Image (spheres, helix red, strand yellow):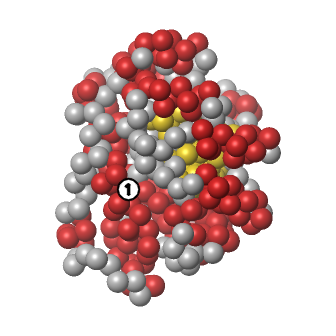
Amino acid sequence: MTAWAELHLHLEGTLEPELIFALAERNDVRLPYADLDDLRSRYDFTDLQSFLDLYYTNMQVLRTEQDFADLTDAYLARAQRAGIKRAEVFFDLQAHTARGVAPEVALGGVHRALDAAEERYGISAGLILTFLRHLPAEEATTAYQQVVDSGVPLLGVGLCSTELGYPTEPFAEVFARARADGLRTVAHAGEEGDASYVRLALDVLGVERVDHGVRAVEDDELIERLIAERMPLTMCPLSNVRLKVVPDLAAHPIVGLLRRGVRVTVNSDDPAYFGGYLDDVVAALREAFALSEAEIAQLARNSIEASFASDVEKARLLGEGPGH
Ligand code: HPA
Ligand code: ZN
């Protein structure tokens, strides 16, 4: 079976409605929804912010270390069924500490599940701490220090949440610190912000991958640069449809960019909110674009090559190394 890497996945975005209700009951949290149908009726988004509002509200059911472990484990089990062999997952620590969860509780649960991923699901997993762009950069530094103090290993740092109106520059310092500590760097850019946000992620934050990058298509010179630098774009077509970044799947630039030679990868972003996990996203793309088997294989290969796995592990996942 083709091996896939998922490189753009928010753990909190895998919180399924059923788990929201189960955790609310376990933790005695009062939800502002009458029932599951009432909750599901709110998954009709107008833009990024309308989604983020629900995403942050639903997270309040995550309280204990076990909750974070259960959330993470449920994703890994589903990812295995999607053919994922490598997962580099985002975690919004600040969204939890801001509501009184101790950093070691949140991080401990996530780490426990990720640490067992290889043995339990055959998935090599890494954790990327995503800073919330709508909060002051000093709070990003605090979150980074909390992870360092917890001893939980990090693969990298990223930047997400509301894009428009929140400048990139204040985050340069914490990104530089993470890089100096040997971590990998990514950032959401060009989802609701225009191509200039993608340039800032490259030039100010020095990222090694751009998350989304959809609006880079509005800047030909930038596209040429992305091709020349073999810069990966971790794209999430179903997310972009649901958040109205593009009018429909057929209008999504991922396949056009693939055919132009940009190193695009396909991802699910927040699968509990946007209509499916990685296998569902690939199936939807296949149907909308009549993708060839060679193009699907290229997307899978791109995902492994754009991952932060070691060269030895990449070769193994691509079926080229020993032990295959
Ligand atoms: N964009 C920005 N921030 C996010 C997203 C997204 O799609 N999902 C979770 N946090
Ligand atoms: Zn995202």
Q: Nearer the viewer, residue 252 or 196?
A: 196
Q: Position of residue 295 (x, y in %)?
A: 42, 21
Say which residue appears at 44% left-offset and 73% top-offset: 60
Amino acid under label 1? Leu
Residue matched to label 1: 52
Q: State whether residue 85 appears in this view.
A: no
Q: From the image, which quarter does the C terminus lie in?
A: top right
Say which residue appears at 45% left-offset and 85% top-offset: 27
Q: Nearer the viewer, residue 105 or 88?
A: 105
* Residue 307 against residue 57 in the figure, above or below: above
Q: Residue 202 occupies which quadrant of the picture?
A: top right
Q: Position of residue 134 (x, y in %)?
A: 48, 52
Q: Position of residue 158 (x, y in %)?
A: 59, 45
Disc tally is 1
- The residue carrying pointer 1 sits among few (fewer than 14), some (14 to 19) or many (20 or more) residues within 10 Å by Cα, namely some
Furthest-right residue in this view: 181
* Residue 30 against residue 13 in the figure, above or below: below
Left or right, residue 114 beside residue 223: right
Left or right, residue 317 beside residue 76: right
Say which residue appears at 43% left-offset and 48% top-offset: 162
Q: Nearer the viewer, residue 256 or 292?
A: 256
Q: Residue 50 occupies which quadrant of the picture?
A: bottom left
Say which residue appears at 41% left-offset and 64% top-offset: 56
| Disc 1: residue Cβ within 8 A of ligand 1's nearest atom | yes
Q: State whether residue 271 appears in this view.
A: yes
Left or right, residue 45 beside residue 126: left
Q: Secondary structure at mark 1?
A: helix
